[in-house]
Amino acid sequence: MSEKVYPVPQDWKTRAHADAAKYNADYTRSIDDPDGFWGDVGKRLDWIEPFTKVRNASFAPGNVSIKWYEDGALNVSANCVDRHLEKRGDQTAILWEGDDPKDSKAITYRELHKHVCRFANALKERGVEKGDRVTIYLPMIPEAAYAMLACARIGAVHSIVFGGFSPDSLAGRIEDCASTCVITADEGLRGGRKIPLKANTDAAIDKVGGVKTVFVVTRTGADVPMKEGRDVRYEDAVKNAAAECEPEAMNAEDPLFILYTSGSTGKPKGVLHTTGGYLVYASYTHELIFDYHEGDVYWCTADVGWVTGHSYIVYGPLANGAITLMFEGVPNYPSSSRFWEVVDKHGVNIFYTAPTAIRALMGGGEEAVKKTSRASLRLLGSVGEPINPEAWEWYYRVVGNGRCPIVDTWWQTETGGILITPLPGATDLKPGSATTPFFGVEPELVDAEGKVLGGAAEGNLVIAQSWPGQMRTIFGDHKRFEETYFSAYPNKYFTGDGCRRDADGYYWITGRVDDVINVSGHRMGTAEVESSLVAHEKVAEAAVVGYPHDIKGQGIYAYVTLNAGVEGTDELRKELVAWVRKDIGPIASPDLIQFAPGLPKTRSGKIMRRILRKIAEDEFGALGDTSTLADPGVVDDLIDHRQNRK
Ligand code: WTA
């Protein structure tokens, strides 16, 4: 791994909110006196009822309970909108850039306030109440932010489903949290292609009961069927709604949103985040890590369907009164200069994206970048998967012209906000390392037995103490929450990631140690893809693993055992890929399918994934001990027919 060090540039030491001395002092205080530290940070929000208690968290087996600011009351939308009206009502809140480069608009905080209040009133009008779940299935249009904030305003709990998920995936998520209301659009638009969101919504609702209202935002103007009594045009609903809506006083521990994410087993889990601690953490990390200053133009390229969009497009930036850019399109449409053209068009100062996008653009060559100015850029960020040093260097040198620090931010849907990251004015950078913990975060490395490792070491990454942005439970299944995150290493939060710490105390995330794979920065449970494959009538058994992929980080490799008499043809491969796409969504499409007459199993019938991973990586010389296999012979066949030959 690269051990090159990029020191903090001189001007950053003075301009940034935190330099090295402040980081060290504040970090020490945050660990030694978390109540004092987070009590002070908590005051950055406007509280309807000020809190007197700060932290009340236990990771004890059988009794996991996490509460922050538990006697305080506040409203997230009031913090993200209303409190900015006096000082910056006419400043841009959301800078929207459409899929088509000719399409863009700026929404001020005052306008945002009206949109949010109107939508909130429209929700109420349709009987949506505090605590009700609302599913949002929208493209990247400003109405997505209005919808989130409108829910927060009346205390409804939103659950956003990424527009790339299939009707089945949407149905599962509507059903799991018993949503009564869905907010969608006629169609989405990405890279010039249309996504039939309303048709998908109709198909999803056909499978589950309980949805009383569907709001349909007009995006493309496509002629979509509207179901009498159930479907409402967003434009009609807000036209007649009042432009004032009193924000609901929410307890700090009232739910704010549910977001489904993949785990190593079973169906996606509804990660539940609450109101006070989440917003304190999202806004504080956004300001410190991206070194946000008044008037900066900040752009996070994520989709609001993922946690990055929740915390770092909408909640964190808006709580800070920032100008946040929201992009509907994709990096390579109309050309692979698009990101940088948008940077120039809007004078973007802070740019936050995923390694997979950087690697894809790297493949397009430097010219597409160099023909743009990018003079406004000051800071770059990375999230979603480990960034390989080559991509880091390219990002730094070509995109940032060697003048912009890169914050490689490690975190998860479960953590609510960034946990391990450089602070640009404080931390010397090492390409490929997420560097050091944020305030209040106590990372530890443990071995398989749970022994805490000191000094330079490699092990499983756990977090020893709660932080305000931590998820509180899995919606409707607290037991699964405890089992998933707190049972492997009692009294610690287990991240599912492997990690190395070097002699300087820098953290290097090595990737998931469970059966979760990270495809283009999107989390995918191998079990989900397997259960989709075995649902196909020709498939007897399937095992799915990740393998290194130049652009995606990890690709999806599926071993499929067919039913007796079925022939494994290329046609069938295509059919299975289409099947999974339709069942889960395009992001779950297998990249490689190997037809396998048998899978390597232990005598007790457990599939030995270690062997399947090695073969998928084309590393079959290092299979390790195969003597415990019920039928060691299957391995030779697997090697002979492997699909990834370097
Ligand atoms: C991975 C995305 C290395 C990690 C915010 C984690 C990273 C999973 C980084 C969470 C990073 C995220 N370096 N790995 N900077 N950021 N990951 O829930 O494996 O979609 O567990 O949250 O992405 O993915 P999730």
Image (cartoon, rainbow, N blue to C red):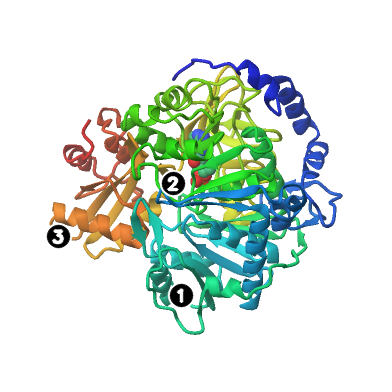
Q: Amino acid at mark 2?
A: His
Rendered position, 421 above or below 265: above
Earlier residue among tags 2 and 3: 2
**What SS does tag 2 mark?**
strand
User: Residues under labels 2 and 3: Cα distance?
Assistant: 33 Å
Of badges 1 and 3, the one in the foreground is 1
Q: Disc 2 vs disc 3: which is toward the camera?
A: 2
Question: 516 or 352, which is in the foreground?
Answer: 352
Q: Position of residue 296 (x, y in %)?
A: 62, 37
Q: Is residue 188 above or below residue 456?
A: below
**The disc labelled 1 sits on which kind of residue?**
Val
Q: Nearer the viewer, residue 133 or 529?
A: 133
Q: Nearer the viewer, residue 132 or 315?
A: 315
The first of marks 1 and 3 along the sequence is 1
- Residue closest to the eye, 319 or 3: 319
Query: Which residue in the structure is indicated by mark 1?
Result: 208
Q: Which residue has dot 3 on it? A: 566
Residue 628 seen from this side? no
Q: Residues within 10 Å of mark 3 (few under 14, many from 20)?
A: few
Q: Quadrant of residue 242?
A: bottom right
Q: Looking at the figure, which quarter contains the N terminus?
A: top left
Is label 1 in a helix, a strand or a loop? Answer: loop
In this picture, residue 329 sits left or right of residue 349: left
What percent of the width, then of the height, locates residue 327? 48, 48
How many labels, in total?
3
Say which quarter of the image contains residue 119. Answer: bottom right
Residue at 49% across, 43% down: 301
Q: Label 2 CB, ligand 1: below 8 Å? A: yes
User: Which residue is tagged 2?
Assistant: 522
